Structures are given as structure tokens and as C-alpha cells.
Image (cartoon, rainbow, N blue to C red):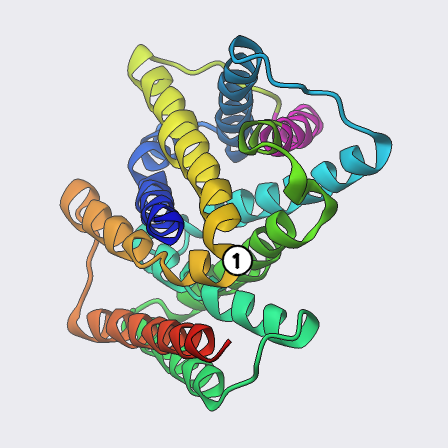
Amino acid sequence: MRSMKGMLWAILSSASFGLVPLFSLPLLRAGVGTPTILFYRMGIAALCMGLVAWTTRRDLKIGFKDMMMFLSLGGLYAATSLWLLMSYSCIPSGMATTVHFLYPLVVSLIMTMFFREKRSWRLLAAALLSVVGVAMLSWGEEDATSTAKGIAMVLVTVVTYACYIVGVNKTRVARFDSVVLTFYVLLSGSAMFFVYGITTTGIERLPSLYLVGDAVLLALVPTVVSNLTLVLAVKHIGSTMTAILGSMEPLTAVLVGVFCFGEQFGILSAMGLCVIVAAVIIVILQARSQRSTD
């Protein structure tokens, strides 16, 4: 039952994270700056989690070492959000999220290299397939330079998000309650984007109530819901299984891009998506095989 709950949390986390383009692209197209969008996203989300922690009387006291670790995790999550949002200006959001879905492979590699998870030829095969899938996505676009730039940005998020997931599970903050952990990660991220905003473009006012609604939903659905369920999933089934059960993320983002924003998704791009998903399925089989032998 614990494993089943963890799997459901992981699927919900990935599906909700895949909705980032649905709420962020209207803000970008209205000319709202990236620092402003991300400050509102993290700030509103941190406020919501703080209210939940306060109303449920959770202990929010932390030590200096814990604060430093929360700042580190917040920095990883902030970097993921920043580079993913910036990539939308170069490549379709569905493609960006598909490439971002390579993070389960990096999680598996980190766990294998640093936490003594068993090595397997399947991880090597998955890594090679993922490279092929990304290449197919790149070749499927006319503007090769812009596409390469966008994919390079997303590849940064692959590493930062993988490190974030492992950090949630393997650092000293893993002992914290899920709500408290999520609150401090989001609070750290909002503080970073506030500083980033006031030193660059400034923190802008949103020009319409419609966009205010988008900002609130961006904070609630792919941020609060995604982060909280991610932490719950990691606590139930660990970093690797949480990462590899994120298959709803690219599917959700591709459907949003095609049906809500009219993004093109040709045959070669679709084949690249399938290859990347196949690579992640190989990692799933590896994880199952490992669990059966432990």
C-alpha cells in the first residue's frame, strides 16, 4: 500500500508539473518578464504552503545547517524553473518538457555512482537511446540554431532537477515533514527570484486579472501540488522510482502545447518523444529487476 501511494503521488506530481506551459506561456506572451513570473510563482506557492503549515500547527523551526541545505535545494529548483521557462522562447514547450524528462536517467546515474545502486547495461542502453531521442527532436525543427540553444537550456534543467530529487531523499532535510520541506524550498526560490528581479528587470505588476489568475494557478498546480506530491513520493518509494514514474510530464506538456497553443509536433519529433519514453521504460525495468533481487 505504501508503494502504491508513492506511485500515485509520483504520477500526480509529473502530470501537474507538465502543466507549467499552460499557465506560464500566456504570461510570457503578454510581455511579463521571466524574473517576475518566477517570483510570483514561488512567492504565492510559498505563502500557500506557509498557511498550510501554520493552520496545521507544524513546527517550522530549523537550524543553520538545515537552512543552508534548504537554500541549496531551493537554488536547484529555482535554476530548473528559470532555464525551463527561458527555453520556451527557443523551442516548443512540449519539446522542452520532453527533453526535461531525461532527468530520471540522471537520477539513476547519480544513485548508481554515489549511493551504490547496482550498475546495469540497461542504464547504458537508456542513456544512448536518450541521446538518439534528443537528436531526433533537434533534427525535426527548421531553425537548428535556435533549437540547439533551447535544448541546451533544458539539458541544464535535467541535471538540476535530478540533483534536487536526490537531495530531497538523501540529505539531512529528508527527515522534515513534507509540508515544511516544500515550504522552505519554495521560500528559498522566491527570495532568489526577488533579488534577481529587482537587480534586473524589476518586479512588474500583472496587467490584467486574467494574467493574475494564470500566475496563481502557476503557483498552485505545477508548483505547490507538484512539489508536495514529489516530496511525498520520494519519501514513499525513493528518488529513482519517483523520477522514472514521471511519464505523465512530457505527455501532458505535449498535449497542452499542441491543443492550447497550436505548437507543431511533426513525425520526427513524435518519434523522438517515443524514443525518450522508451529509454525511461528501460530504467523502470532496471529498477524492478533491482528490487526483485534485493
Mark 1 secondary-structure assignment: helix
Main SS, magenta residues: helix
Outermost residue, bottom direction?
Answer: 121
Q: Would residue 134 be seen by someone viewing this image from the given angle?
A: no
User: Start and end of the magenta stretch?
Assistant: 184-201
Residue drawn at (58%, 12%) of the image: 57
Quarter-of-image position of residue 279 = bottom left
Asked if residue 276 lies left or right of residue 87, the reply is: left
Quarter-of-image position of residue 143 = bottom left
The vertical placement of 172 against 151, above or below, is above
Q: Amino acid at mark 1?
A: Ser
Residue 30 in percent (x, y) is at 35, 27
Residue drawn at (54%, 65%) of the image: 107
Residue 50 in percent (x, y) is at 57, 17
Task: Name the residue carrying label 1.
Answer: 239
Residue 181 in percent (x, y) is at 61, 33
- Is residue 194 shown in magenta? yes
Q: Would residue 64 be seen by someone viewing this image from the given angle?
A: yes
Residue drawn at (29%, 37%) of the image: 22
